Amino acid sequence: MVQSTSPILYVNPTSGSDSAAGSQSAPFKTIARALQQVRSGTTIQLASGTYSTASGETFPLFIPSGVTVLGNESNKGNGIQITGGGTYASPTFANQMATFRLDNNAQLRGVTVTNPEIRGTGVWIESTAPTIANCTFVNCKREGVFATGTANPVVNDSVFFQNAANGISIVRDTKGEFRRNVYQNTGFGLAIGDNAAPLITDSRIFENRSGIVLSKAARPVLRGNTVERNTESGLISLERSVPNLGSSQDPGGNIFRDNGEFDFQNATSPPITIASAGNQLTPTKVQGPIEFLVSEVPTPAPTPSPTPAPIPVPTPIPTPSPTPNPIPVPTPIPAPTPTPLPIPVPTPSPTPTPTPAPSSLSDVRGHWAETFIQGLISRNLISGFPDGTYKPEAPITRAQYASIVAKAYDLPLKQSATNFSDVPQNFWALDSITKSNRMGFIAGFPDGTFRPGQNLTRVQALVSLVNGLGLTGGTPSVIGVYSDRAEIPSYATDLVATATQKRIVVNHPNLAQLRPSMDITRAEVAALVYQSLVATNRAPAIASAFIVDPDVSIAIFPDVSQHWAKDFVLGLASQNFIKGFADGSFQPDAPMTRAQYAAIVAKAFNPAPKRDAFKFPDVAADFWAKPMIDQAYRAGFISGFPDGTFKPNQNVTRLQLVLSLASGFSLPPGDVSVLNLYDDRSAIPQNVLDRVAAATQERIIVNYPNVRQFSPNRDATRAEVSAMVYQTLARDGRVASLNSPYIANA
């Protein structure tokens, strides 16, 4: 068998062969074979057809970290049908039957998935953080996606249609973001249980048995969803589950209407009053204790929703229609019957437990927040657990947070002590709660409670630190760096801006995502508290790619939100390296002139001179980009033409862009054999092959829409310049690495 070294592998179930090279002209036959050849950064491109055991597939298919399985995102995988399932031994739910399993940073895009096996699940996500986008899950015998453990997935723009049990099941301590999905004609649209706290936003949930069913202690955040025409109820809360339906400062914006029994059925036991603010929710269609809050933020009136157009889904292998289970109270996740595993939740004791040395914390080494955690442990502000772990991804309660703040700061007491009704005198954290409250870091609730066992959210932590430290000086426009800025409550906008300006905000894995409503983890608290110490000159600064830059000035680019280069563009804009136009657009597909490119080089790299200046006759002394052209020229990034001109308004080509970056950073000559991954290698001039190879080996080159097509002579677009400049910064660790299927990978 021939082993492919290409960063993109091709699979065709009709014409392919598993003994082939996996190239476009000689594709593999099975996804399973392609997965045996991958490394991080590889994209597996699927041709139209059916992938099943009949075509040679072996299930479940495991997509490792950094690998993308790509079908056709434009039609949500229509015509790229993956059918089948295999046994997976889940640590939290015993043996399961799944089509796919996804590792951290794995991606599944533009495919249709059907698991016809008994209790079949389309994608099983076990304590990982993958991405699923523009897929269709249809006729799975149980659900399309099952997320469990400490999963933190992103599931966007996908369709869940005619699955027997649920569209998505979300359990254990899963978080994650589920945006712009459609859940139709399935058992329950979403079943959320245990301690899961996902963000469900901008989704359509209709014509299911029930729309959203919550159980145990689930705490999902619901924003901007339309839940309508479900046979039973739109939203059901069972046991101790409490959905976040907004507050007076942060309206929910959900629409509940025309559901068969109730739009919202609060069946919590014992009854818990659930607040609703800024939602379309008719009181006569509600059962159970609901507190309707008045929104202090104006929200647009909902527009009448037309009868939804049919969702185009492929016709999978026929399977018998499931007979609904006629039970009076819905069971959110009917299939798994696990043996519960003990999940230790740390409860600090008044008697300190010996803390393991930072180097001995088994689950911190190599963690993105390791330096922050060690910085606080070395100051005796936080501790690990007796088993030698830190549990960085576990949530933190208000009491635990108060304990950290009380240790971290000795500030003047701003207010008299409050006697919280739910904090008894013998409570382990009484002194810490009292001190942090009197310093102004944390307050109680209007009913006189403190709720010490309630998890803290990310925005609450930021607001607490800014208020407690009395920080000011934030520029409101600075929050434009966050792609989810609309989710920041209005009361917190200025405070988040201040935290950003003071370099307190740390966002992992995506600098542009604040995730304000999500429960904060122990790792994230360590990062924010450490940065607050840096901001007040109590600790030395440390280097991290996830600290949001304080001098952010990012425009809201409406023409980039769905663009392939969105993350590259926003990544540069968040560092103030590029800007948009006066109308608020970025114009990602417009060409870029040599003068504009020189300006980006000067801004992003601030390169030192390597040679003397040159006076170009066509660059006037008062030309807007003259200083940047001079700097880029002296640093070796860009040169003039044989006639002595610079031609500032001439568009830069893709080849010129790559050669500029290779020259400016003095990349050593590369191995020209790596250029075999380009189908148009012959279009690259012979005298520059080694420099293009060097840029390829450094993962600087980004090719859209076909990663194998270099197109050297085509004008580079603003998006392409942004992507390759970003990749150059990522090479030096100045920005976080991105996982894009369009990065050429040698």
Image (spheres, rainbow, N blue to C red):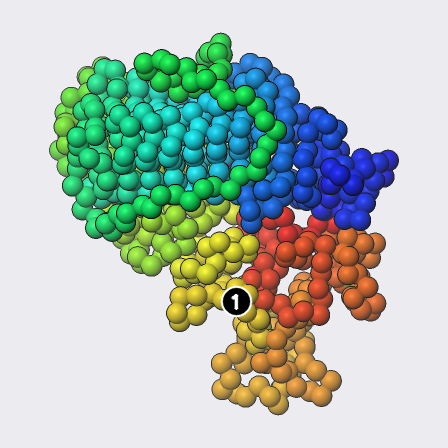
Q: Secondary structure at mark 1?
A: helix
Residue 339 versus residue 262 in the image, above or below: above
Q: Which percent across, then down, holds residue 643?
A: 71, 88
- Percent position (x, y) of residue 148? 49, 24
How many numbered discs, if any? 1
Q: Residue at x 21, y 24 (%)?
A: 287
Label 1 packing within 10 angstroms: few (<14), some (14-19), many (20+): some
Tell me: 6 left or right of 524. right
Left/right placement of residue 125 relative to residue 472 reads: right
Q: Position of residue 719 (x, y in %)?
A: 56, 62
Relative depth, front residue between 639 and 296 = 296
Q: Quadrant of residue 13?
A: top right
The residue that appears at 48% across and 58% down in the rendered structure is 560
Q: Residue at x 71, y 64 (%)?
A: 711
Q: Is residue 695 above or below residue 607?
A: above
Measured as percent of width and height from the top left, residue 247 is found at 23, 39
Left or right for 432, reference 358: left
Residue 472 in view, yes or no: yes
Q: Is residue 577 above or below residue 615?
A: above
Q: Quadrant of residue 262?
A: top left
Q: Residue at point 55% right, 65% down?
A: 589
Q: Is residue 526 visible?
A: no
Say what amino acid the circle numbered 1 marks: Lys
Instruction: Work out whether residue 44 or residue 581 is closer to the camera in this orientation and state it.
Output: 44
Find the residue positioned furthest to the top. 339
Which residue matches tag 1? 603
Relative to 243, residue 97 above or below: above
Residue at the far right: name it: 1
Quarter of the image that includes the N terminus = top right
